[in-house]
Amino acid sequence: MAFGNYPPSCVKWRLNCTPVVPFLLFLWCFSHIVSGQIRYTIPEEMKKGSVIGNVAQDLGLDVQRLRSGRARIVTGQSIQYTELKTDKGILVVNERIDRELLCGDVTPCSFSFEVILENPMELHRITVEITDINDNSPTFENDEITFEISESAALGSRFLLASAEDTDAGSNGLQKYILSANDIFNLKQHSSPDGRKYAEMILQKPLDRETEPKISLRLIAVDGGTPHRSGTVNIYITVLDINDNPPVFNQSLYRAAVHENALKGTYIATVNASDADSGSNGQVTYRFSNMKSQLADIFHLDSTTGTITLSGQVDYEKDKKYEIMIEAMDQGGLTDSSKVLIEILDVNDNAPVINVMSFSSPVPEDSPLGTTVAIINVIDADSELNGQIICTTDRSLPFKIKSTLTNYYALLTDSPFDREVVPEYNITVRAADSGSPSLSTTTILRLKISDVNDNAPSFDQINYVAHVAENNSPGMSIFSVKARDIDWNQNARISYLLEETQISGNPTSSYVSINSETGVIHAVRSFDYEQIKELPLVVKAQDGGSPPLSSNVTVKILIQDQNDNPPQVLYPVQTGGSLVAEMVPRSADVGYLVTKVVAVDVDSGQNAWLSYKLQKATDRALFEVGSQNGEIRTIRQVTDKDAVKQRLTVIVEDNGQPSRSATVVVNVAVADSFPEVLSEFTDFTHDKEYNDNLTFYLVLALAVVSFLFITCVVVIISVKIYRWRQSRVLYHSNLPVIPYYPPRYSDTLGTGTLQHVYNYEVCRTTDSRKSDCKFGRAGSQNVLIMDPSSTGTMQRIQSEKSILDEPDSPLEVRPLTFRFVPLNDVCGLVNSQCHCVLI
């Protein structure tokens, strides 16, 4: 789009139409910022909202890209003259633009700004050139111009006229002067090196004060606009008496220079003009001619000496030079003019100004190298070396700065981030110029690093070992595990899980559970050390990231034994209705091994350490029990006075806290022959059974008498029942002998196995109440279990003796079966390690 007198081809610059293309392409290849620049030309004084150009089309962008990229205009000017309509992709006028106010005398007049887009980041520069319109008329500083001219003024004398000012530029500016019609003065126009036009009156006819003492003329300044504009000023000339020599400057152009930081009163230059006249007509005074009003406050001219000094402040960044016209006048009104060119020297008095155009914070810790963090604009109002900028940042930080467009820099990442090590950075950006001394400016950017789930939870131990006592309460807390995750927020939120494994064929969850938040392990059931001694678990700690990360740890829960099982006596075996007796011959010596109490405890450790103690005994002076091995031995010589029947009560205790115990009764028969033993134990048992039968009959008789009163039938039936019971009692008295033999056992203390053997015969009759027992050979131990309800006579069978005496006879090592036979028949052979049970 083009405006004014510029052809369309000059409206915008393309990247391939500018000499800085290679440099821009180089920058573009090494940065992540897409950049370009376009140029528009518009006339001044356009209405607000007027369209400047289609930015989206000229930049080759989609309108949707402008909206998604949050396109915006960035300008360093206090007034934003343009506005970007992102919904249409056009650039419009935002404020009325006055070219004269914006640029003054500078041509061409333009201003630049940048359009920034994000995601991805793009930077485009737009330059808008303002063309002038003829909206200002030429004006004179004063309403009138006065001259005092001597009548003797020579023909061709020049009189410099005040210049008009036209703030328009180009053809719309001041083009010519017109002097009102007269025959005395002619007008001649001139142009200064800076393009300014001024005029002089040239005397073409001698003056005659007596004829015409005062002359009035009009000077018209005309511009070149369409339509033309003009300004006028009145010229009043007073004709003086003769003064025929005007002042003359010794130089037509004076040059001077002053630093912009010069103090008030600084000397600049001195002008000098001479007059050949004498007296008052030769006295010359100096004054500024056609000076702008603002210059009068900056420079001072001594009217007598012609010395120019600094009376105000000069700024190189505003004006780099000044052209001043100086007029010399004598007392007769004759004048001469000269020009003074004052050049302002730059001083490094402006530090760079840093503007952060765009800044992205936070940045993910997994951002790739070269990610653009910020775009920075740096401006230095100084020139040349004083305005050359070097932008740097701290080299110890993982960032670097690259130049993109002129005065624009991109802050890029230079190494990977780790939020767990450094969660945020204070980035100091320093911009320094190349002046001497150098001026610099710094700004600090606080960049936060956002977390990425890149760390798995870690346990504070490689593995855990916990202890819990058996018989615990279900649901009790056993142990807790703890894991840490150095990530942040949700990525560091840890959940604890049990890996499902098998323990003794059962799933882990049937034994323990874990609190997913605290990591506390609870017992699901009560544990029994005798069934399971340890629980190997695998606990997984998983964070809340996406995807989640996890780690495992092994937890071994050891079940601690408690003394919850009493000792169990294996030998001697306690029978319900029979008597077990260990046989000790009366010839037994001191230390004779009667028997050994064998017990076990299913507990472990000290809870299974057993000790034996004799609690009760018929004769405590005869027997003792080994506290460690349970052996019952004689502690003195057995005598004939010792009772045949000895009853020992042995208590077995474990070493638990508190201890548990078991009691076993050991019957010992002190005798040299079985008949003696049988006689003693039979009487004892028979009396007991007799008393039991007597009680039974008394109860039965009482019941029969009670029922006689009811009916005779009941009595008859009762009598028959009584008789039937009597017959059954006689029948059951002839029971077979059932052998019982305990297994051989090993001495736990290494004393060996009880290998002593007795071979004996028992013969009984069906009616005898006494029994005879003869021994085949002596032995160290005999055990009998008898039932006194059986009667009969036992007699030895001579024909079997020879077989029993043989050491390798199979009858010694196999169980023997007993049966009832008539008198004089063989009833059985018994191994001494077997028990004979008479029921």
Image: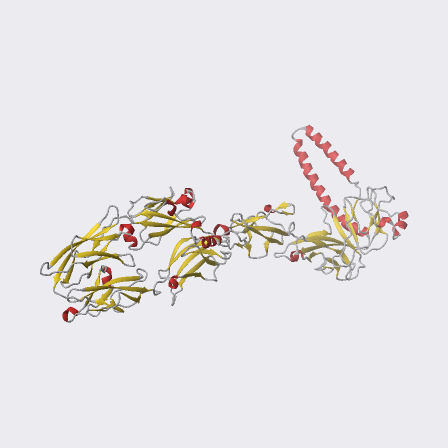
In the rendered image, which quarter is residue 510 located in?
top right
Image position, residue 619 (x, y; %): 72, 58
Image position, residue 517 (x, y; %): 51, 50
Q: Is residue 654 visible?
A: no
Q: Is residue 284 visible?
A: yes
- Residue drawn at (43%, 44%) of the image: 60
Which quadrant would the N terminus be assigned to in this image?
top left
Residue nearest the observer in this picture, 468 or 143 = 143
In the rendered image, which quarter is residue 403 located in?
bottom left
The answer to whether 223 appears left or right of 401 in the picture is left
Does 30 sit above or below residue 342?
above
Residue nearest the observer in this picture, 44 or 605 = 44
Q: Residue furthest left?
A: 210
How many discs appear?
0
The answer to whether 753 appears left or right of 337 in the picture is right
Which quadrant would the C terminus be assigned to in this image?
top right
The answer to whether 738 appears left or right of 319 in the picture is right
Residue nearest the observer in this picture, 220 or 823 = 220
Image position, residue 779 (x, y; %): 83, 55
- Residue drawn at (35%, 60%) of the image: 381
Image position, residue 102 (x, y; %): 29, 53
Colour mapping used in the image: secondary structure
